Amino acid sequence: MSETQGFRSGFVSILGRPNAGKSTLLNALVGQKVAIVADKPQTTRATIQGVAHWPGAQVVFLDTPGIHAPKSSMNRRMMDAVRAALDQRDLLLFVADATLPFTPADEHAIDLLRQASTPTLLLLNKRDLVKDQASLLPLLDRYRQSFEFAEYLPISADRGAGLDEVRAAIVSRMPEGPPYYPPDHVTDQPERFLACELVREKIIRETHEEVPHSVVVLVDHWEEDERLTRITATVYVERTARRASSLARAGRG
Ligand SMILES: Nc1nc2c(ncn2[C@@H]2O[C@H](COP(=O)(O)OP(=O)(O)OP(=O)(O)O)[C@@H](O)[C@H]2O)c(=O)[nH]1
Ligand SMILES: [Mg+2]
């Protein structure tokens, strides 16, 4: 009997419209924060890998930018990243916001699923914000009319509600195979990128209007001693009048 017999492993992409809660779900499934989260659309700009190590299974998740009609070159790059995340996946998770009605923009997002022909779970997120859970049924039906999902699960990624069912639905669809990564591998993001992302998250959360979308954060200095990691980063915004510098300090361990 081989060592990996019965072990399951596979690749799963998390897709959906901006602000649906994809990155929140990634963090919840992986069990730690690998992607930044904010209540503004287009928080995630590139695909972010997060690896979940569960008993008997390893799942390599890819979080993606929200599906939207691209208007700028950055938006086009974001949509290229979404399309790339559809390739060679064992399963897709389509995250939708339970508090919003079904619109043509949802139909447009689902068009991408049609091109992929990969089994897809519909995860109707933010169910904690819906007082009357029965009202979710017509919305689920509307999604069902548009596309034949493999399963329909109302969840709250934020609160962890319904995630046991999600994990079970994912694992049951992973092929048998050995783990792809060692147990301590959680993300492919370099520490420096994560530091920049955490600064960007705070800026997105604290600013409004055009600022959140024009922010770029770059690390200038990275200094580690036994107790502390000192990180100096510069925050760039599109207009020079808004240029600012920030010093972020993070404790280690
Ligand atoms: N009430 C509630 N809020 C949630 C839930 N899941 C996510 N949110 C909030 O929804 C907002 C968007 O969450 P994100 O995880 O950044 O959404 P996203 O789909 O990754 O967004 P983009 O990266 O911009 O496409 C944040 O304010 C989250 O805290 C949930 O289950 N319940
Ligand atoms: Mg995101």
Image: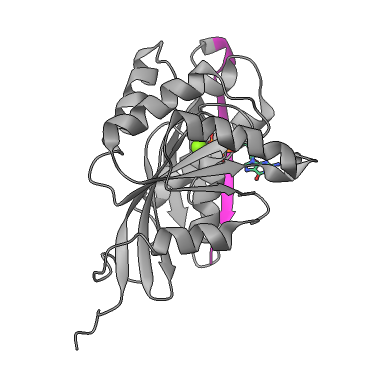
- In the picture, measured across the screen, residue 125 lies left or right of residue 194, that is right
Note whether residue 246 is visible. Answer: no
The magenta segment:
241-253
* Direction right: furthest residue: 131
- In the picture, measured across the screen, residue 243 lies left or right of residue 182, that is right
Residue name at image x 58 percent, y 18 percent: 211
Q: Position of residue 112 (x, y in %)?
A: 35, 28
Q: Position of residue 244 (x, y in %)?
A: 57, 24
- In the picture, measured across the screen, residue 47 lies left or right of residue 180, that is right
Q: How many marks?
A: 0
Q: Position of residue 136 (x, y in %)?
A: 67, 38
Residue name at image x 35 percent, y 46 percent: 119
Residue name at image x 41 percent, y 38 percent: 148
Residue 113 magenta = no
Residue 244 magenta = yes
What is the magenta segment's predominant secondary structure? strand
Q: Position of residue 66 (x, y in %)?
A: 46, 30
